[in-house]
Image (cartoon, grey):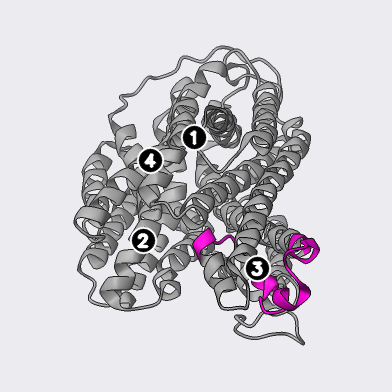
């Protein structure tokens, strides 16, 4: 893209009715994702399985989306976006029925595999259909609505799902996703789209390479804690000469990812249709948008992991309490993602990006100093609100940069890159933050206990301090109750844990603040232009 000004274009304004269906499609996917953690307790009780087995529903959904989204984008180009969109929405509805009626955990896992495979096509479909149905300011507003839909879904899933799960059971939650699927299917008949291109061929080699890379990276990062960051832990399924399989998976995933890019570039040089057209990342500005998207989604995932973990596990409070504590953040993201498009005509993406990363950095540093064991304090709420403003603005901004920079024929490729980036960033942000916090807590707690005068070495030797995690005070008391510790010594250990837990949490926020500050580098490479200053990238406009 160049910063040259073009003759003003007359924009055709379309009804927002079709966008309602696309908005609800994003809500459908996000609500399903948010509802799964709320439903784990009910599934454990209904199916009589351990929580680790029930959580497989979350894992298989994420893996299916991440591994298939690029293939799904190419399939949409071949079949036609509206047709395939309707088909996969029906499949998503079927997955909801399986969740509602599932007699065993296997049926529920199958339901989420279908949901993930459907979402892998819905994600690029949303971008392609927005590009086909809207232009200019309408397109920017439509793109922003997808970001706000994610936040809206998180709020509603926690509130509605938590209430239903407490009063009725977990299955009625998925009646909501079924109803959403029906509504999206009905509204899809107001969408317009080009017919599919039967000549499009799906690159199966590239599909296998990127699918394998994403699966290995996701499994590797998600299991850093359970399997070990370097050396294999007892919970690891196997080891490689004593090494944990988690980092091995990460390295293999990176190798397969590099092989995917090499193969795709070779295919493009030969004039063959690639799985994803890398020309959408042809300039430093588009690549900067992807880097910025990865960083902000990873930070969001880290915060969404840290705060609920601390509230539910450490403080022993309910998911409903968590949703109330996260409400200021989620509401702010929802509002900001919707309203940020109003600033596009005044400020360039580079200015908005730098300012927003500045906000997230200030907010994280602020949280590092003011956070306490009580999340309802005004300073903590203020910090979450400011972080939400920056996060909501950035997710919409960088996505809009990619959409406006590519012709509508490549909108599906933009959607697949968005889906892959967001799913991988979410997994990396959650896993790395978890591993970082647990490692710092273990080291800090071990050192503090060892140096405490009331806790002799003989007593410390009776507790496996290497396994210290974010646990509640009651659970820590139970650990020390199994030793020779006196009540006074147990109280001292609990006090140390409270202090080190909070210190670790603050250090975690400072680490995120450093990452946010470093993000100024890719943000400084975002485009300087304003949306109305660039020509339409679609070939038809040339």
Task: Count neighbours of disc 1 (C-alpha within 10 A) and say few if under 14, some if 14 to 19, many if 20 or more.
Answer: many
Q: Is residue 47 left or right of residue 136?
A: left
Eyeballing the image, is 68 above or below 418? Answer: below
Q: Position of residue 185 (x, y in %)?
A: 24, 47
Quadrant of the image occupied by residue 19: top left
Q: Which residue is mark 2?
A: 115
User: Foreground mark, 1 or 2?
Assistant: 1
Q: Is residue 169 left or right of residue 5?
A: left
Element under disc 2 = helix
Q: Which residue is mark 3?
A: 224
Task: Count neighbours of disc 2 (C-alpha within 10 A) and say few if under 14, some if 14 to 19, many if 20 or more.
Answer: many
Quadrant of the image occupied by residue 524: top right
Eyeballing the image, is 129 above or below 473? Answer: above
Between the C-alphas of marks 2 and 3, the distance is: 26 Å
Which of the two labelled residues, at mark 4 and mark 1, occupies the earlier sequence position?
4
Q: Which residues are magenta?
A: 447-474
Which of the two labelled residues, at mark 4 and mark 3, occupies the earlier sequence position?
4
Q: Position of residue 509 (x, y in %)?
A: 67, 43
Disc 3 vs disc 1: Cβ atoms closer than 8 Å?
A: no
Total marks in image: 4
Between the C-alphas of marks 4 and 1, the distance is: 10 Å
Which dot marks residue 155?
Answer: 4
Query: Which residue is rendered at x = 33% and y = 42% of the image?
Result: 156
Q: Which residue is mark 1?
A: 329
């Amino acid at each position: 893209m160049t910063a040259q000004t073009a003759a003003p274009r007359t924009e055709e304004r379309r009804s927002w009715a079709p966008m309602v269906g696309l908005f609800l499609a994003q809500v459908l996917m996000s609500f399903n994702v948010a509802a799964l953690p709320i439903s784990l307790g009910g599934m454990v009780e209904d199916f009589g399985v351990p929580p680790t087995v029930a959580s497989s529903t979350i894992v298989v959904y994420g893996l299916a989306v991440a591994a298939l989204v690029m293939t799904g984008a190419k399939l949409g180009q071949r079949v036609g976006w509206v047709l395939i969109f309707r088909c996969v929405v029906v499949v998503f509805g079927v997955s909801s029925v399986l969740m509602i009626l599932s007699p065993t955990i296997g049926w529920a896992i199958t339901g989420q595999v279908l949901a993930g495979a459907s979402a892998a096509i819905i994600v690029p479909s949303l971008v392609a259909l927005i590009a086909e149905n809207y232009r200019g300011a309408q397109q920017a507003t439509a793109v922003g609505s997808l970001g706000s839909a994610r936040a809206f879904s998180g709020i509603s899933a926690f509130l509605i799902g938590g209430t239903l799960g407490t009063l009725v059971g977990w299955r009625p939650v998925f009646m909501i996703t079924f109803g959403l699927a029906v509504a999206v299917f009905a509204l899809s008949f107001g969408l317009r789209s080009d017919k599919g291109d039967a000549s499009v061929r799906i690159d199966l080699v590239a599909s296998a390479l990127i699918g394998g890379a994403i699966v290995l990276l996701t499994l590797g990062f998600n299991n850093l804690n359970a399997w070990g960051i370097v050396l294999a832990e007892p919970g690891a399924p196997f080891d490689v000469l004593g090494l944990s399989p988690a980092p091995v998976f990460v390295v293999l995933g990176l190798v397969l990812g590099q092989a995917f890019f090499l193969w795709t570039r070779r295919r493009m040089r030969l004039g063959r249709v690639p799985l994803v057209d890398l020309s959408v990342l042809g300039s430093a500005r588009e690549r900067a948008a992807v880097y910025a998207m990865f960083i902000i989604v990873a930070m969001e995932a880290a915060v969404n992991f840290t705060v609920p973990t601390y509230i539910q596990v450490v403080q022993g409070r309910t998911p409903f309490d968590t949703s109330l504590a996260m409400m200021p953040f989620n509401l702010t993201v929802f509002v900001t993602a919707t309203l940020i498009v109003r600033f596009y005509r005044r400020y360039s993406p580079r200015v908005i990006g730098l300012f927003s990363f500045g906000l997230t950095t200030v907010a994280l540093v602020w949280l590092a100093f003011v956070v306490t064991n009580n999340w309802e304090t005004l300073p903590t709420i203020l910090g979450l609100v400011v972080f939400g403003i920056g996060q909501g603005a950035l997710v919409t901004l960088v996505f809009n940069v990619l959409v406006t920079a590519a012709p509508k024929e490549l909108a599906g490729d933009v959607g697949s890159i968005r889906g892959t980036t967001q799913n991988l960033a979410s997994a990396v942000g959650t896993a790395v933050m978890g591993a970082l916090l647990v490692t710092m807590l273990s080291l800090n707690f071990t050192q503090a206990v060892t140096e405490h005068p009331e806790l002799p070495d003989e007593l410390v030797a009776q507790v496996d301090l290497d396994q210290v995690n974010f646990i509640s005070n009651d659970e820590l008391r139970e650990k020390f109750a199994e030793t020779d510790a006196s009540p006074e010594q147990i109280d001292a250990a609990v006090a140390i844990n409270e202090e080190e837990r909070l210190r670790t949490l603050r250090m975690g926020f400072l680490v995120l603040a450093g990452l946010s500050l470093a993000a100024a580098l890719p943000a400084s490479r975002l485009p300087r232009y304003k949306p109305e200053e660039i020509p339409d990238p679609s070939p038809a406009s040339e």
